[in-house]
């Protein structure tokens, strides 16, 4: 099969042939139709994070396709079902986190396109217990971004605990952020969108943001405090830039929650006195559970959230990575694996 493979960190992906995997007991084979390109794929291909994937590997965790073959004992899906193979590729199912429906933090979790091969290939091996079930009425291309960018921001908004009528500041209006704005509006929140690119901010307004702030002009935290009369009740930082994190904490209202989602390599300083004295919560959020996934997909199926996509062939993957690095992707690129 054709695949885009990371052979060395920091080098272009190699477009090459790769053996079609054979599903073992309890596994399924998915024939890929489309796969979104997440900024995480760029981090993975660069080896940005402390735990690195084993080379060579196939990235991609927004892969959508049709079940093509079942391993022994699989009953949860049938051939021809449309499924998504997400970042949460599998988990153990019986640790304290799995038992409390927090399978996203299972210590034995596997990650699609990272510890397991992903969707930048014609076929993907998957665990049928963890695939996303794609509702009818959505194309593979338009639904692909929902299974990472969508579920991640939907969950991230939930854990800000901001309530309808309250303010959320969304820092970064790229693949994740453009969906976050739509989820937040559908959830009844008032949205302040923050980015460094005026074209992304103009798009944020079109998507329903009530206020926009250009973080490259002046102090964005001051601008958010002014626009929201005292800071955002919830802050969701999707920007892959460390500078956005310190700013995001400073945008948070007293007793508010700042949720960290972007994953640029490195650390950022937290102003201890401000966080303590204002009783601010700073918390991480990692994709979403299977239940979050079903809910995030339902918003899309009902037309409340729609990914803006640019569809390109798999062969464009290296160009797309360069554009992502430079912030030159409008919202999300989705790679097509075979004709429409
Ligand atoms: P993207 O490249 O599509 O979008 C990033 C956006 O951030 C762009 O619009 C860019 O202009 C903007 N930006 C850059 N610097 C900024 C700054 N200083 N302030 C405000 N905005 C700024 O990326 P994406 O696919 O949306 O992914 C974003 C990040 O989220 C990545 O680091 C990715 O790894 C991470 N991520 C995390 C999870 C999770 O579960 N926590 C899931 C998916 C992606
Ligand atoms: Zn992702
Ligand atoms: Zn577990």
Image (cartoon, helix red, strand yellow):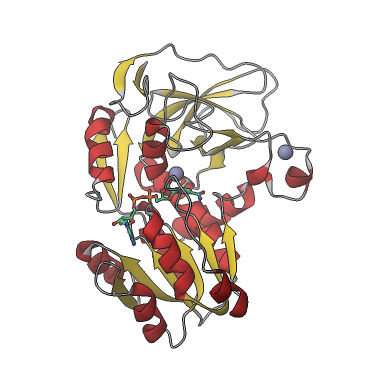
Q: Is residue 184 above or below residue 328?
A: below
Residue 27: give x, y in percent of width and height. 61, 23
- Is residue 185 at least partly visible in the picture? no
Please give the name of the residue rendered at 56% of the width and 68% of the height, measured from the top-left corner. 160
Q: Is residue 114 above or below residue 298?
A: above
Relative to the observer, which residue lies in front, 103 or 125?
Answer: 103
Number of numbered tags placed on the structure image: 0
Q: Is residue 112 above or below residue 227?
A: above
Q: Is residue 172 left or right of residue 206?
A: right
Please give the name of the residue rendered at 35% of the width and 70% of the height, measured from the top-left corner. 193
**Residue 317, located in which quarter of the rendered image?**
top left
Residue 297: give x, y in percent of width and height. 50, 53
Residue 28: give x, y in percent of width and height. 57, 24
- Is residue 29 at least partly visible in the picture? yes
**Residue 11, located in which quarter of the rendered image?**
top left
Residue 259: give x, y in percent of width and height. 53, 62
| Ligand 3 positioned in quadrant | top right
**Residue 185, located in which quarter of the rendered image?**
bottom left
Which image quarter holds the C terminus?
Answer: top left
Please give the name of the residue rendered at 39% of the width and 64% of the height, measured from the top-left corner. 171
Which image quarter holds the N terminus?
Answer: top left
């Amino acid at each position: 099969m054709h695949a885009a493979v990371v052979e060395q960190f920091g080098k272009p992906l190699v477009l090459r042939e790769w053996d079609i995997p054979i599903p073992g007991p309890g596994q399924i084979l998915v024939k890929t139709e489309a796969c979104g390109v997440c900024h995480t794929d760029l981090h993975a291909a660069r080896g940005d994070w402390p735990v690195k994937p084993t080379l060579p590997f196939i990235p991609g965790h927004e892969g959508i396709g049709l079940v093509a073959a079942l391993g022994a004992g699989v009953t949860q899906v049938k051939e021809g079902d449309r499924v998504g193979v997400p970042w949460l590729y599998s988990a153990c199912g019986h640790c304290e986190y799995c038992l409390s429906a927090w399978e996203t933090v299972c210590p034995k979790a596997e990650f699609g396109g990272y510890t397991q091969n992903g969707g930048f290939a014609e076929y993907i091996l998957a665990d049928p217990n963890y695939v996303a079930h794609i509702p009818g009425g959505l194309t593979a291309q338009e639904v692909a971004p929902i299974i990472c960018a969508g579920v991640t921001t939907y969950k991230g908004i939930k854990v800000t605990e901001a309530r309808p009528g309250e303010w959320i500041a969304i820092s970064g209006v790229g693949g994740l952020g453009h969906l976050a704005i739509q989820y937040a509006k559908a959830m009844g929140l008032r949205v302040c969108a923050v980015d460094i690119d005026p074209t992304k901010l103009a798009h944020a307004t079109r998507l329903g943001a009530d206020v926009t702030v250009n973080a490259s002009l002046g102090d964005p935290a001051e601008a958010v405090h002014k626009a929201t009369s005292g800071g955002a009740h919830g802050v969701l930082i999707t920007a892959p830039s460390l500078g956005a994190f310190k700013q995001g904490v400073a945008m948070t209202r007293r007793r508010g929650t700042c949720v960290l989602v972007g994953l640029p390599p490195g650390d950022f300083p937290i102003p201890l006195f401000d966080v303590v004295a204002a009783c601010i919560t700073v918390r991480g959020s990692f994709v979403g559970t299977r239940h979050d996934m079903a809910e995030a997909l339902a918003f899309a199926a009902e037309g409340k959230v729609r990914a803006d996509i640019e569809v390109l062939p798999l062969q464009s993957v290296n160009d797309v990575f360069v554009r992502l690095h430079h912030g030159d992707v409008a919202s999300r690129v989705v790679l097509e694996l075979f004709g429409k």
